[in-house]
Image: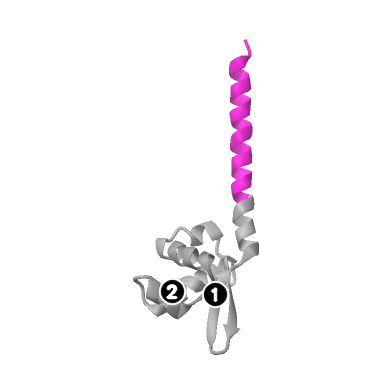
Amino acid sequence: MSTYALDPWTALGDPSRRQIFERIAERPRSVTELAELLPISRPAVSQHLRALREANLVTVRAVGTRRIHQVNPDGLRTLRNDLDSYWGGALANLKELAEQETQP
């Protein structure tokens, strides 16, 4: 495991990781299931899942001999908070500009 956490936005910047994350968001899946759905190998899927885990976007649980990957609600909450912060700032700036235009 890495000594630092990968930024979730950076992790999702890779198209393959985004596709994997989207499939896992539909429902929890194994590496084999993901590899069957995507045009990448199982080892590549595993590497992308590791990056998503380091970014705190995905968790893994054992079910017998299989490892099932699912979206981490805490990581998703972090992304949502970031987006809310960005939108909050943008809307505040828009309001300020609109108010300035209405003043003489």
Residue drawn at x 59%, y 29% as measured from the top left = 94
Q: Is residue 94 above or below residue 80?
A: above
89 inside magenta stretch: yes
Q: Is residue 54 above or below residue 64?
A: above
Residue drawn at x 52%, y 85% as measured from the top left = 66
Q: Residue furthest bottom?
A: 65
Q: Is residue 51 above or below residue 66?
A: above
Residue drawn at x 40%, y 79% as measured from the top left = 42
At numbered mark 2, what does the secondary structure look like: helix, strand or loop?
helix
Residue hosting label 2: 34
Q: Position of residue 75 (x, y in %)?
A: 61, 62
Query: Which region is colored magenta?
Result: 82-104
Q: Position of residue 83 (x, y in %)?
A: 59, 48
Q: Residue furthest left?
A: 39
Task: Judge the density around disc 2: few (<14), some (14-19), many (≥20) Cα neighbours within 10 Å.
Answer: many
Amino acid found under the numbered disc labelled 1: His
The colour scheme is: one colour
Residue hosting label 1: 69
Q: Are marks 2 and 1 in contact (CB under 8 Å)?
A: yes
At numbered mark 1, what does the secondary structure look like: helix, strand or loop?
strand
Amino acid found under the numbered disc labelled 2: Leu
The numbered disc on residue 44 is none
Q: Label 2, label 1: how many angstroms apart (C-alpha)? A: 10 Å
Residue drawn at x 53%, y 65% as measured from the top left = 25
Secondary structure mostly seen in magenta is: helix
Q: Position of residue 101 (x, y in %)?
A: 58, 17
Res. 65 image quadrant: bottom right
User: Left of 48 or right of it: where is 76?
Assistant: right
